Image (tube, rainbow, N blue to C red):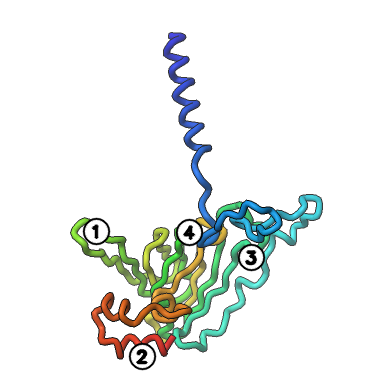
Amino acid sequence: MAALNMISYIFLAMLLHVAYATDPTQLQDFCVGEADPAKGLFVNGMLCKNPMGVTLDDFIFHGILTPKSTNNAQGSAVTTVSATQLPGLNTLGISMARVDFGPFGLNPPHIHPRGTEVQTVLEGTLYVGFVTSNQPNGGNKFLTKMITKGDIVVFPQGLIHFEFNIGNTPAVSLVSFSSQNPGVITIANATFGSQPPISVDVLSKAFQLDPSIVKYLQSKF
């Protein structure tokens, strides 16, 4: 019996060691190491405030109920509530956002490289969907559905997704993330609007488009 207990303790210790040995989730796209402290400017997250100077205001955000203007090309606007806007979120691994949609407004295809998204529809009806990563057969499955007020949809971390207001009245949703800084990459902007631009030859071959069309798309972004 004593030997069995000892084996159990050793196994538990191994599990705890593995858990503590894993790397934390990155909070930036990259963090290149710098050996000289005098040259180091960024950390993987945010610098911490002296605890003696913390107040409840550090944990309160005002304005999530205030809609943003959707008078833009996509007809949507996002109010972000991450550790940048709400310092008390730092190191807690969560953040939020509000998404406003004008009539037939679109939150275009994008990904969050560092967080899973949970979105709740507060008003309106949204056509939503996400695309899986590459499947063994080389394809990508598209999952989509109409959701309305009170419905919740989950977009797994790193997968392309979108929301489209199919109504002629405004819509709004509230979003939660599993990261204090989930990041966002808008697919069209990143592909055709990066600076410096991606080579026309690369994009024309990747999308099987005439180079003139690629140049036109780049001019739009």
| Badge number at residue 84 | 3
Name the kind of residue labelled 2 in the image. Tyr
Foreground: disc 2 or disc 1: 2
Q: Which of marks 3 and 1 is nearer the N terminus?
A: 3
Q: What residue type is labelled 4?
A: Arg
Q: Give the Cα separation between the discs numbered 3 and 4.
A: 16 Å
Label 2 or label 1, whichever comes before in sequence order: 1
Residue at which label 4 appears: 114
* Residue type (three-letter) at the residue carrying disc 3: Thr
- Disc 3 vs disc 2: Cβ atoms closer than 8 Å? no
Write the residue at 77% across / 52% down.
50
Estimate how packed mark 4 is, as few (under 14), some (14 to 19) or many (20 or more) residues with alpha carbons within 10 Å. many
- Pointer 3 with pointer 4, Cβ within 8 A: no
Furthest-front residue in this view? 36
Q: For marks 2 and 1, give the CA distance.
A: 32 Å
The N terminus lies in quadrant: top left
Residue 61 at x, y percent in the picture? 67, 66
- Dot 1 crowding, Cα within 10 Å, few <14, some 14–19, many 20+: few
Q: Which quadrant of the rendered structure holds the C terminus?
A: bottom left
Residue at the spot of label 1: 135
